Amino acid sequence: MSAFQLQPLQMGSLRVEWPVFLAPMAGYTDGAFRSLCLEQGCGAVVTEMVSSQGLMRNRTRTARVLERWGDEHPLGAQLYGSDAGVMAAAADWIAGQGVFDFLDINAGCPMPKIRNRGDGAGLMRQPAKMAEITRQVVAAVAGRLPVTLKTRLGWNADTINVLETTAGVEAAGAAAIFLHGRVAAVRHSGPSNWDLIAEVKRTRKVPVIGNGGVKTAADVFRMVAETGVDGVMIGRVTLGNPWLFRDIRDRAAGREPRLPDVDEVRAMIHQHLRRALDLMARRGAKELKLGAELTACLVMRPHLVRYLRGFKGFGELARTLEERVDAATLLGRVDAVLATGRKG
Protein backbone atom coordinates (compact mmCIF):
# COMPACT_ATOMS: atom_id res chain seq x y z
CA MET A 1 0.00 0.00 0.00
CA SER A 2 1.33 3.42 -0.87
CA ALA A 3 1.58 6.01 1.89
CA PHE A 4 -0.80 8.98 2.05
CA GLN A 5 -0.11 12.33 3.66
CA LEU A 6 -2.07 15.19 5.15
CA GLN A 7 -0.52 18.60 5.58
CA PRO A 8 -0.66 20.60 8.83
CA LEU A 9 -3.51 23.09 8.94
CA GLN A 10 -3.29 26.70 10.11
CA MET A 11 -6.51 28.11 11.58
CA GLY A 12 -5.63 31.66 12.54
CA SER A 13 -3.10 31.37 15.37
CA LEU A 14 -3.67 27.62 15.81
CA ARG A 15 -1.63 25.03 13.93
CA VAL A 16 -3.26 21.62 13.72
CA GLU A 17 -0.52 19.15 12.87
CA TRP A 18 -2.87 16.33 11.81
CA PRO A 19 -6.08 17.83 10.32
CA VAL A 20 -8.44 14.94 11.06
CA PHE A 21 -11.17 16.20 13.40
CA LEU A 22 -13.80 14.48 15.52
CA ALA A 23 -17.14 16.14 14.76
CA PRO A 24 -19.20 17.51 17.63
CA MET A 25 -22.19 15.21 18.30
CA ALA A 26 -24.75 16.03 20.98
CA GLY A 27 -25.02 13.24 23.51
CA TYR A 28 -21.82 11.53 22.38
CA THR A 29 -18.70 13.71 22.24
CA ASP A 30 -18.16 14.41 25.91
CA GLY A 31 -14.68 14.48 27.40
CA ALA A 32 -14.65 10.73 27.94
CA PHE A 33 -15.13 9.90 24.27
CA ARG A 34 -13.09 12.83 22.93
CA SER A 35 -10.05 11.87 25.00
CA LEU A 36 -10.20 8.28 23.77
CA CYS A 37 -10.30 9.49 20.16
CA LEU A 38 -7.30 11.77 20.74
CA GLU A 39 -5.37 8.84 22.16
CA GLN A 40 -6.20 6.79 19.05
CA GLY A 41 -4.72 9.46 16.79
CA CYS A 42 -7.44 12.05 16.20
CA GLY A 43 -5.89 15.40 15.30
CA ALA A 44 -8.36 17.70 17.08
CA VAL A 45 -11.72 17.46 18.84
CA VAL A 46 -14.72 19.71 19.48
CA THR A 47 -17.13 19.76 22.40
CA GLU A 48 -20.81 19.01 22.09
CA MET A 49 -22.65 22.17 21.11
CA VAL A 50 -23.41 24.48 24.04
CA SER A 51 -26.27 26.97 24.14
CA SER A 52 -25.15 30.60 24.30
CA GLN A 53 -28.43 31.53 25.99
CA GLY A 54 -28.03 28.71 28.52
CA LEU A 55 -24.45 29.69 29.23
CA MET A 56 -25.49 33.25 30.03
CA ARG A 57 -28.56 32.27 32.09
CA ASN A 58 -27.26 29.30 34.05
CA ARG A 59 -23.55 29.18 33.56
CA THR A 60 -22.68 26.40 36.01
CA ARG A 61 -25.15 23.84 34.65
CA THR A 62 -24.70 24.65 30.96
CA ALA A 63 -20.92 24.76 31.26
CA ARG A 64 -20.97 21.06 32.16
CA VAL A 65 -21.13 20.45 28.39
CA LEU A 66 -17.68 22.04 28.13
CA GLU A 67 -16.01 19.87 30.76
CA ARG A 68 -12.84 18.08 29.75
CA TRP A 69 -11.32 14.75 30.71
CA GLY A 70 -7.60 15.10 31.13
CA ASP A 71 -5.48 17.33 28.95
CA GLU A 72 -7.48 17.43 25.71
CA HIS A 73 -5.74 19.37 22.93
CA PRO A 74 -6.33 20.67 20.35
CA LEU A 75 -9.86 21.27 21.65
CA GLY A 76 -12.55 23.53 20.24
CA ALA A 77 -15.66 24.72 22.09
CA GLN A 78 -18.78 24.78 19.93
CA LEU A 79 -21.38 27.46 20.60
CA TYR A 80 -24.87 27.84 19.15
CA GLY A 81 -27.51 30.56 19.14
CA SER A 82 -29.03 33.22 16.93
CA ASP A 83 -28.69 36.39 19.04
CA ALA A 84 -25.41 38.02 18.06
CA GLY A 85 -25.02 39.87 21.34
CA VAL A 86 -25.59 36.78 23.46
CA MET A 87 -23.28 34.73 21.24
CA ALA A 88 -20.57 37.36 21.66
CA ALA A 89 -20.99 37.44 25.46
CA ALA A 90 -20.82 33.64 25.66
CA ALA A 91 -17.77 33.59 23.38
CA ASP A 92 -16.04 36.14 25.58
CA TRP A 93 -16.66 33.93 28.64
CA ILE A 94 -15.38 30.80 26.85
CA ALA A 95 -12.24 32.57 25.65
CA GLY A 96 -11.65 33.80 29.19
CA GLN A 97 -11.46 30.23 30.51
CA GLY A 98 -8.08 29.82 28.83
CA VAL A 99 -8.52 26.09 28.18
CA PHE A 100 -9.80 25.96 24.59
CA ASP A 101 -7.76 26.17 21.41
CA PHE A 102 -10.51 27.50 19.14
CA LEU A 103 -14.18 28.46 19.23
CA ASP A 104 -16.61 27.05 16.67
CA ILE A 105 -19.97 28.59 15.74
CA ASN A 106 -22.67 26.00 15.03
CA ALA A 107 -24.53 27.01 11.87
CA GLY A 108 -25.40 23.50 10.75
CA CYS A 109 -27.25 21.48 13.41
CA PRO A 110 -30.23 20.00 11.53
CA MET A 111 -32.32 18.94 14.54
CA PRO A 112 -35.81 20.46 14.17
CA LYS A 113 -35.93 21.83 17.73
CA ILE A 114 -32.69 23.73 17.03
CA ARG A 115 -33.07 24.82 13.42
CA ASN A 116 -36.75 25.79 13.62
CA ARG A 117 -36.03 28.52 16.15
CA GLY A 118 -33.32 29.99 13.96
CA ASP A 119 -30.30 28.42 15.68
CA GLY A 120 -27.88 25.93 14.13
CA ALA A 121 -28.88 25.22 10.53
CA GLY A 122 -31.57 27.87 10.87
CA LEU A 123 -28.85 30.48 10.41
CA MET A 124 -28.42 29.33 6.81
CA ARG A 125 -31.73 31.00 6.02
CA GLN A 126 -30.30 34.33 7.20
CA PRO A 127 -26.81 34.75 5.69
CA ALA A 128 -26.49 38.34 6.93
CA LYS A 129 -27.23 37.27 10.51
CA MET A 130 -24.74 34.38 10.25
CA ALA A 131 -22.06 36.83 9.14
CA GLU A 132 -22.97 39.34 11.86
CA ILE A 133 -22.79 36.69 14.57
CA THR A 134 -19.37 35.69 13.26
CA ARG A 135 -18.22 39.33 13.25
CA GLN A 136 -19.36 39.94 16.82
CA VAL A 137 -17.93 36.66 18.13
CA VAL A 138 -14.57 37.40 16.49
CA ALA A 139 -14.59 40.86 18.06
CA ALA A 140 -15.53 39.48 21.47
CA VAL A 141 -12.71 36.93 21.65
CA ALA A 142 -10.30 39.68 20.56
CA GLY A 143 -7.63 37.39 19.19
CA ARG A 144 -7.54 35.05 22.19
CA LEU A 145 -8.93 32.17 20.09
CA PRO A 146 -9.41 31.51 16.39
CA VAL A 147 -13.11 31.52 15.50
CA THR A 148 -14.35 28.86 13.08
CA LEU A 149 -17.82 27.99 11.80
CA LYS A 150 -19.51 24.69 10.96
CA THR A 151 -22.30 24.75 8.40
CA ARG A 152 -24.06 22.86 5.61
CA LEU A 153 -24.80 23.35 1.93
CA GLY A 154 -28.18 24.96 2.55
CA TRP A 155 -31.60 24.59 4.14
CA ASN A 156 -32.92 22.17 1.50
CA ALA A 157 -32.21 21.13 -2.07
CA ASP A 158 -33.96 24.22 -3.42
CA THR A 159 -32.08 26.70 -1.26
CA ILE A 160 -28.41 25.78 -1.52
CA ASN A 161 -26.63 29.01 -0.64
CA VAL A 162 -23.33 27.81 0.78
CA LEU A 163 -21.24 30.03 -1.48
CA GLU A 164 -23.05 33.08 -0.13
CA THR A 165 -22.98 32.05 3.52
CA THR A 166 -19.31 31.04 3.52
CA ALA A 167 -18.31 34.24 1.74
CA GLY A 168 -20.05 36.21 4.47
CA VAL A 169 -18.43 34.44 7.39
CA GLU A 170 -15.01 34.55 5.75
CA ALA A 171 -15.35 38.32 5.35
CA ALA A 172 -16.50 38.54 8.98
CA GLY A 173 -13.27 36.97 10.22
CA ALA A 174 -13.78 33.21 10.46
CA ALA A 175 -10.41 31.45 10.55
CA ALA A 176 -11.73 28.23 8.98
CA ILE A 177 -14.96 26.64 7.78
CA PHE A 178 -16.16 23.12 8.57
CA LEU A 179 -18.53 22.12 5.77
CA HIS A 180 -20.97 19.22 5.90
CA GLY A 181 -21.83 18.14 2.37
CA ARG A 182 -25.61 17.74 2.90
CA VAL A 183 -28.54 20.13 3.31
CA ALA A 184 -30.27 20.47 6.66
CA ALA A 185 -33.53 18.88 5.48
CA VAL A 186 -31.94 15.43 4.98
CA ARG A 187 -29.97 15.61 8.22
CA HIS A 188 -27.49 12.69 7.85
CA SER A 189 -29.13 10.60 5.13
CA GLY A 190 -28.17 10.29 1.49
CA PRO A 191 -24.89 11.05 -0.25
CA SER A 192 -22.60 13.89 0.76
CA ASN A 193 -22.00 16.33 -2.12
CA TRP A 194 -18.24 16.42 -2.37
CA ASP A 195 -18.39 18.33 -5.67
CA LEU A 196 -19.94 21.30 -3.91
CA ILE A 197 -17.48 21.02 -1.04
CA ALA A 198 -14.75 21.24 -3.70
CA GLU A 199 -16.36 24.35 -5.18
CA VAL A 200 -16.45 26.04 -1.80
CA LYS A 201 -12.81 25.11 -1.22
CA ARG A 202 -11.82 26.66 -4.57
CA THR A 203 -13.72 29.84 -3.71
CA ARG A 204 -12.67 30.48 -0.13
CA LYS A 205 -9.28 31.70 1.07
CA VAL A 206 -9.54 30.35 4.61
CA PRO A 207 -9.11 26.62 5.25
CA VAL A 208 -12.12 24.44 4.45
CA ILE A 209 -12.53 21.16 6.33
CA GLY A 210 -14.83 18.62 4.66
CA ASN A 211 -17.44 16.62 6.57
CA GLY A 212 -19.92 13.93 5.54
CA GLY A 213 -19.61 10.70 3.59
CA VAL A 214 -16.49 9.34 5.32
CA LYS A 215 -16.94 5.70 6.33
CA THR A 216 -13.41 4.29 6.16
CA ALA A 217 -9.83 5.41 6.56
CA ALA A 218 -9.43 5.36 2.79
CA ASP A 219 -12.35 7.80 2.43
CA VAL A 220 -10.40 10.47 4.31
CA PHE A 221 -7.68 10.54 1.70
CA ARG A 222 -10.17 10.18 -1.13
CA MET A 223 -12.04 13.25 0.09
CA VAL A 224 -8.84 15.27 0.23
CA ALA A 225 -7.83 14.10 -3.25
CA GLU A 226 -11.25 14.74 -4.81
CA THR A 227 -12.11 18.04 -3.14
CA GLY A 228 -8.81 19.64 -2.19
CA VAL A 229 -10.03 20.31 1.37
CA ASP A 230 -7.50 21.25 4.01
CA GLY A 231 -8.74 18.67 6.49
CA VAL A 232 -11.51 16.18 7.23
CA MET A 233 -14.05 16.06 10.06
CA ILE A 234 -15.56 12.68 10.93
CA GLY A 235 -18.72 12.06 12.94
CA ARG A 236 -21.09 9.12 13.40
CA VAL A 237 -18.82 6.42 11.94
CA THR A 238 -16.44 6.92 14.89
CA LEU A 239 -19.09 5.95 17.45
CA GLY A 240 -18.12 2.58 18.84
CA ASN A 241 -15.03 2.80 16.66
CA PRO A 242 -12.47 5.32 17.97
CA TRP A 243 -9.90 3.00 16.37
CA LEU A 244 -10.80 4.61 13.04
CA PHE A 245 -8.40 7.42 13.91
CA ARG A 246 -5.63 4.83 14.40
CA ASP A 247 -6.58 3.31 11.05
CA ILE A 248 -6.22 6.68 9.34
CA ARG A 249 -2.75 7.14 10.79
CA ASP A 250 -1.84 3.59 9.75
CA ARG A 251 -3.03 4.16 6.21
CA ALA A 252 -1.00 7.37 6.02
CA ALA A 253 2.06 5.36 7.01
CA GLY A 254 1.35 2.65 4.46
CA ARG A 255 0.09 0.10 6.98
CA GLU A 256 -3.12 -1.89 6.60
CA PRO A 257 -5.89 -0.92 9.04
CA ARG A 258 -6.92 -3.74 11.36
CA LEU A 259 -10.00 -4.72 13.30
CA PRO A 260 -9.53 -4.34 17.08
CA ASP A 261 -9.43 -7.68 18.85
CA VAL A 262 -11.83 -8.60 21.65
CA ASP A 263 -9.38 -7.60 24.38
CA GLU A 264 -8.99 -4.15 22.81
CA VAL A 265 -12.76 -3.68 22.63
CA ARG A 266 -13.11 -4.73 26.27
CA ALA A 267 -10.34 -2.38 27.39
CA MET A 268 -11.83 0.53 25.45
CA ILE A 269 -15.30 0.03 26.93
CA HIS A 270 -13.92 -0.26 30.45
CA GLN A 271 -11.82 2.87 30.01
CA HIS A 272 -14.73 4.76 28.44
CA LEU A 273 -16.99 3.98 31.38
CA ARG A 274 -14.26 4.82 33.89
CA ARG A 275 -13.88 8.26 32.32
CA ALA A 276 -17.64 8.79 32.19
CA LEU A 277 -17.71 7.99 35.92
CA ASP A 278 -14.93 10.51 36.53
CA LEU A 279 -16.91 13.23 34.77
CA MET A 280 -20.13 12.44 36.63
CA ALA A 281 -18.35 12.35 39.99
CA ARG A 282 -17.65 16.07 39.62
CA ARG A 283 -21.33 16.90 39.81
CA GLY A 284 -23.32 17.59 42.95
CA ALA A 285 -26.11 15.41 44.28
CA LYS A 286 -28.71 17.98 43.20
CA GLU A 287 -27.59 17.65 39.57
CA LEU A 288 -27.83 13.85 39.44
CA LYS A 289 -31.06 12.37 40.73
CA LEU A 290 -29.78 8.83 40.14
CA GLY A 291 -26.25 9.43 41.39
CA ALA A 292 -22.96 9.48 39.48
CA GLU A 293 -22.59 5.74 38.84
CA LEU A 294 -26.06 5.02 37.49
CA THR A 295 -25.99 8.19 35.39
CA ALA A 296 -22.63 7.26 33.85
CA CYS A 297 -23.98 3.81 33.00
CA LEU A 298 -27.01 5.38 31.31
CA VAL A 299 -24.75 7.74 29.35
CA MET A 300 -22.82 4.70 28.11
CA ARG A 301 -25.88 2.96 26.63
CA PRO A 302 -25.80 4.51 23.14
CA HIS A 303 -22.05 3.92 22.97
CA LEU A 304 -22.41 0.27 23.97
CA VAL A 305 -24.89 -0.28 21.14
CA ARG A 306 -22.18 0.75 18.71
CA TYR A 307 -19.25 -0.98 20.39
CA LEU A 308 -21.06 -4.31 20.56
CA ARG A 309 -23.60 -4.58 17.74
CA GLY A 310 -21.17 -6.68 15.67
CA PHE A 311 -21.08 -9.42 18.33
CA LYS A 312 -23.32 -12.49 18.36
CA GLY A 313 -24.67 -11.92 21.87
CA PHE A 314 -25.55 -8.27 21.42
CA GLY A 315 -29.29 -8.89 21.09
CA GLU A 316 -29.49 -10.20 24.64
CA LEU A 317 -27.68 -7.15 26.01
CA ALA A 318 -29.86 -4.80 23.95
CA ARG A 319 -32.96 -6.12 25.71
CA THR A 320 -31.53 -5.11 29.09
CA LEU A 321 -30.11 -1.67 28.25
CA GLU A 322 -33.13 0.15 29.68
CA GLU A 323 -32.44 -1.35 33.10
CA ARG A 324 -30.71 0.82 35.68
CA VAL A 325 -27.68 -1.14 36.84
CA ASP A 326 -24.35 -0.38 38.47
CA ALA A 327 -21.01 -0.39 36.67
CA ALA A 328 -19.99 -3.89 37.79
CA THR A 329 -23.25 -5.38 36.53
CA LEU A 330 -23.05 -3.52 33.24
CA LEU A 331 -19.45 -4.54 32.60
CA GLY A 332 -20.30 -8.13 33.45
CA ARG A 333 -22.97 -8.07 30.75
CA VAL A 334 -20.49 -6.53 28.32
CA ASP A 335 -17.97 -9.30 29.00
CA ALA A 336 -20.67 -11.91 28.36
CA VAL A 337 -21.42 -10.38 24.95
CA LEU A 338 -17.74 -10.19 24.03
CA ALA A 339 -17.36 -13.87 24.91
CA THR A 340 -19.84 -14.80 22.17
CA GLY A 341 -17.46 -13.55 19.47
CA ARG A 342 -18.11 -11.49 16.36
CA LYS A 343 -20.83 -12.30 13.84
CA GLY A 344 -19.66 -14.11 10.72
Image (spheres, rainbow, N blue to C red):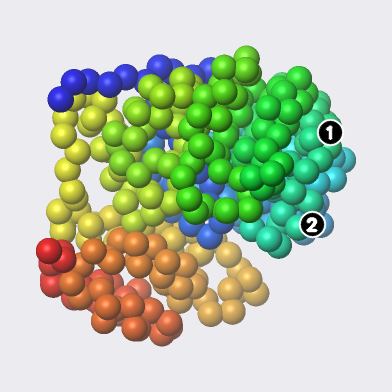
Q: Nearer the viewer, residue 64 or 312?
A: 312
Q: Which residue ends up furthest to the front in the rendered image? A: 158
Which circle's residue, 2 or 1, is located before the other in the chain?
2
Q: Can residue 257 be seen at all in this image of the molecule? A: yes
The answer to which of 84 and 256 lies nearer the viewer is 256
Report the residue at 84% width, 33% height from top: 128
Quick one: label 2, few (<14), some, or many (20+) residues within 10 Å? few
Q: Quadrant of the C terminus?
A: bottom left
Left or right position of 218 against 175: left
- Percent from the top left, x then y, of residue 266? 22, 61
The answer to whether residue 78 of the structure is visible from this angle is no
The picture quadrant where one finds residue 255 is top left
Q: Taking 98 as reference, is 262 above or below it?
A: below
For the point 16% across and 66% down, the residue is 343
Residue 329 point in image, percent of width and height: 30, 79
Residue under circle 2? 117
Type of amino acid under label 2: Arg
Residue at the spot 16% in from the left edge and 34% down from the top edge: 256
| Residue for point 61% across, 29% down | 177
Checking the image for residue 21, the label placed there is: none
Q: Is residue 31 left or right of residue 330?
A: right
* Residue type at the position of mark 1: Ala
Mark number displayed over residue 128: 1
Q: CA distance from mark 2 to mark 1?
A: 17 Å
Helix, strand or loop status at disc 1:
helix
Q: Is residue 101 left or right of residue 226?
A: right
Q: Position of residue 176 (x, y in %)?
A: 61, 25
In the picture, residue 232 is in which quadrant?
Answer: top left
